[in-house]
Amino acid sequence: MRRPRIVFSIDSNPHPTRRGPREYYEIEADYLKALWSAGAMPIVLPYESADELVQHQSEWDGVVLTGGDFDIDPALFHEAPHPKLGTIKRERSAFESKLYQIALDFNKPVLGICGGMQLMNVLQGGTLIQDIATQYNRSQSNSAGSHPTESGPARPQNTQGVHTGTANIPTVKQGTQNQRTTLNHEQVECKSQAGHSIAIEHDSRLAEILGVTRIGVNSTHHQAIKEVSSFYRCVAKAPDGIVEAIENRNAKTGWHLGVQWHPEAMVDSRQHQIYHAFVKHASWAI
């Protein structure tokens, strides 16, 4: 059987050359190594291919929406730009949005990493905190909590081998409504190391994949999910209540997982199980 073909989003940046500036497509090597090690064939497509993605959808099997050194356009969730808003890359976001929609329409698995998770949420009607340091306080953590589906509780997972005790996801206490987070979500340490821990819902797909309900993650973002789309549920939080992972509520809508950190960059081998689980589901379409 052939390897599942995974389309992943890439960055586009100008670089000076001796013949003048040139545009380069770029991706961190860790993404490619993680996908290949998990059994996938990474596929690079230019932004210009967006209009033909549907025509060729049978030739690829899943989507990874990667992170990057840029911010999501707040116009996508109907907000004005915050003064701390960073660079916006509309062409890249438009390409990623097209990829996401095709994956949704044709039931292909989607893995969102860092900003990729944020975009998944926005494309389903969720919103973002544009700058954690100036906009976030712990009182917002309730709006991003885990909720039941419209038809009842979230679907049960096979939790064999998983620590099924309470995940202790933080909730807001009286007197913290104006408390700013003291957790640094833009760590100075290398991404191979954990910047803080997260608590994971015991009945989640993520807990089943990792085999634990608490784990250390790296943290390299200044934006975060504010309101979780009704399409998704929050399945992990940082100690200050920031949303760290989302999953689709309804299994009939496919396999969707978004994480706020970069598992591909971490030395903890458990983190790479996220890519293995994603590739496993992509292989089912072959």
Image (cartoon, rainbow, N blue to C red):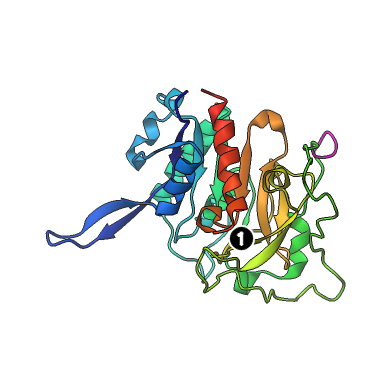
**Of the pair 28 and 235, the residue shown nearer to us:** 28
Residue 22 position in % (x across, y down): 22, 55
User: In the structure shown, which secondary structural element does the residue marked by tag 1 occupy?
Assistant: strand
* Visible residue check, residue 77: no
Q: Main secondary structure of the magenta part?
A: loop
x 58%, y 53%: residue: 269
**Of the pair 214 and 94, the residue shown nearer to us:** 214
Taking the image as shown, residue 116 lies to the left or right of residue 241, namely: left
Tag count: 1
* Residue 176, placed above or below residue 213: below
**Of the pair 222 and 218, the residue shown nearer to us:** 218
x 17%, y 61%: residue: 17
Q: Residue furthest left?
A: 19
**Tag 1: amino acid:** Ala
Residue 231 position in % (x across, y down): 69, 40
**Of the pair 82 and 240, the residue shown nearer to us:** 240
- Characterize the local packing of mark 1: few (<14), some (14-19) or many (20 or more) Cα atoms within 10 angstroms: many
The quadrant in which residue 138 appears is: bottom right
Residue 97 position in % (x across, y down): 49, 41
Residue bearing the label numbered 1: 224
* Visible residue check, residue 69: yes
Taking the magenta stretch, the answer to whether it contains residue 5 is no
Taking the image as shown, residue 241 lies to the left or right of residue 217, namely: right
Taking the image as shown, residue 226 lies to the left or right of residue 159, namely: left
x 57%, y 49%: residue: 272
The quadrant in which residue 226 appears is: bottom right
Residue 220 position in % (x across, y down): 54, 65
User: Over which residues does the magenta segment extend?
Assistant: 150-154
* Residue 260, placed above or below residue 109: below
